[in-house]
Amino acid sequence: MKKQVTFLLILSVSLLTGQIPAGYYDNAQGLTGYQLKTALKQIIDNHTVYSYDDLYDIYVDSDTDHYYENDGTVLDMYSEKPSTADVYEYHHNQNTCGQYSGEGDCYNREHILPQSIFGSASPMKSDAHFVVPTDGYVNNRRSSYPFGVVNNPSWTSTNGSKLGSNSTQGYSGTVFEPIDEFKGDIARMLFYVATRYESRIASWGSSDMLDGTSDHVFSDWFLEILITWHNQDPVSQRERDRNDAIYSYQHNRNPFIDHPEWVAAIWDPSPDTQAPSVPANLHVTSVTDTSIQIAWDAATDDRGVTGYQIFVDNNMIGNVNDTQYQINSLSPDTTYQICVKAYDAANNFSNCSNNISVTTMSPYLLNETFDNCPSMQFVSVSEASNKDWTCINQYGENNSPAIQINGYQADTDCEDWLITASPVNFDNYQNERLSFFTVHKYGNTPLLLVYSTDYDGNGNPSDFTWTPVPNVNLPIPDGTNTEVTYPVSNADISGINGTAYLAFKYFTQTYQPTRWTVDSVTLSAESISNINNIASVKVKIYPNPAQKFFYIKTPVPIVSAALYDLSGKQININYHSDNQMVELKNISQGMYILQLETQKSIVSKRIVVK
């Protein structure tokens, strides 16, 4: 019971902890290289040590899935499938190992730096910053092997973690490769170990991963992999939350989650000072009344692009690893200035992209409730009879005010129009939807909904061309003396082109007069007037996946071709313009982005190399 109370008190502290404590890293400011590493060691040293068994309780706060399935289960980097449902899952403090014969039997505690290296000594053995919950069977398959890059796995876990020979230069032994989602997490855990235990790590001797020193710490081949993973998989919200949770217990932090730029400042012999290229071709892909969707071409960098910052009216409102972003919670009918910056792991920032001005659409092109009649967005025109459309205080939707025509006129045919006061330029919009509410009583006179692209707002409407509005067919009254309602909801009228007036036309001809009531007329649409359209070029790549080469087929000449990995780093290729072939030499398996510049536009296509 005493132990439970202790953990409850610490949990209450963790709920209040959501950021780096003020002044925590003051003694590290302005330092670089191994001096910075030693200063950080002194800051995060002497943490509060818990027992090995306590880790299972700490994991409730530090390693719960609030990010993928968001189901409160144990977040295990060796079984989590970020884009699909996990094959199996664990609940905290249930099914802890124990015996296992395969994946999904039980979970235990995995030392990211194998405890055989430090003889299972304390405090390393129970340091939650690098001891994580994992499936027991996968943990066993990883064994004490280093992490590395596996091209031809001898075994693969259900989430894609692989065991096999390392494929990078400098080491050919057996390694374990986690999935891309967690490579940066693991690299930063190992950088933490190298820093927190700087005064001990040389005594652990050299190994496949360690070089036996207390400053450089890692073997060259292994350090190169860790830095690559750190750059390609930036710090996630999950890592930040985990860092906060463990700090609430151990009272020390992983500085490389709080300041990822310190990895380069300590271990990179040639610090990255080159900023990424400016993101090109920033454009709008969709606009609503409260959101703007934007996209741009990937930036490039000598070390790899980490992400992009989004600026609205000179204020940074978000960042993303992708090359598209949706800006939400905007005001309708408002103009915004938008640009994007690229940045790398060393916090080098590009200049802002091309600045685009985008106006959110009004919720409605037309929104008339007739509550303030006769002030309204329609005008009444009578070509025959004196029975104009008239404002009324009832009979509308929910018995609200409306506008009505009562067409009885002895020996006179009625021809009365209710026309929009202003025309709508349908060419500036897309996905136009019309809604309104009608009520009819008596007679059999139809009410027509029509539009005209040649009406000029003057003279008799019948002198101009009027066409039925598409997808709207009002019923012909059957003479009943009771009120019959007929609402129209979101009718697709996007088939109208050009600038047009909309009109309700009442025309008795030989019909029996009918009383028609109209209310709640709304016209919504998506604005396309401020979308920067890029010329569309059809591109075909074959074969895809490719091995040694692939061909490009386009209807227009290619000015240049470039290949980039998913971090934005350019990959060397041989492009033969005579037959539009790209030759692949010494390129690792994986997904790449082919960027083609044509005379019309820049086109990006995905290519898989196997």
Image (spheres, rainbow, N blue to C red):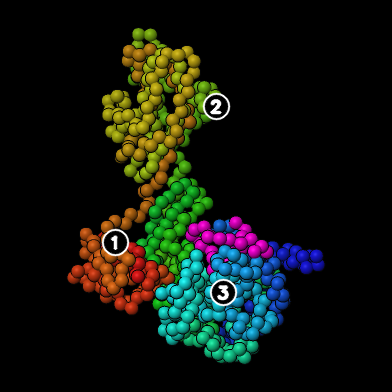
Residue at image coords 62%, 58%: 72
The residue indicated by pointer 2 is 398
The residue indicated by pointer 3 is 140
Query: Foreground residue, 362 or 40?
Result: 40
Q: Can residue 375 be spotted in the picture?
A: no
Residue at image coords 32%, 66%: 545
Q: The C terminus appears in which quarter of the rendering?
A: bottom left
Q: CA distance from mark 1 to mark 3?
A: 52 Å
Mark 3: which amino acid?
Asn
Q: Is residue 52 left or right of residue 82?
A: right
Q: Where is residue 297 shown, x and y percent of the image?
A: 37, 64
The residue indicated by pointer 1 is 601
Are circles 1 and 3 on residues that touch, CB within 8 Å?
Answer: no
Of callouts 2 and 3, the N-terminal one: 3
Of callouts 2 and 1, the N-terminal one: 2
Mark 1: which amino acid?
Ser
Residue at image coords 41%, 45%: 526
Q: Nearer the viewer, mark 2 or mark 3?
A: 3
- The residue segment tinted magenta is 71-95
Q: CA distance from mark 2 to mark 1?
A: 53 Å
Q: The N terminus appears in which quarter of the rendering?
A: bottom right
What secondary structure is found at the residue carrying circle 3? helix
Q: What's the magenta bit mostly, secondary-structure-wise? A: loop
Q: Pointer 2: residues within 10 angstroms few (<14), some, or many (20+)? A: few
Query: Foreground residue, 528 or 603?
Result: 603
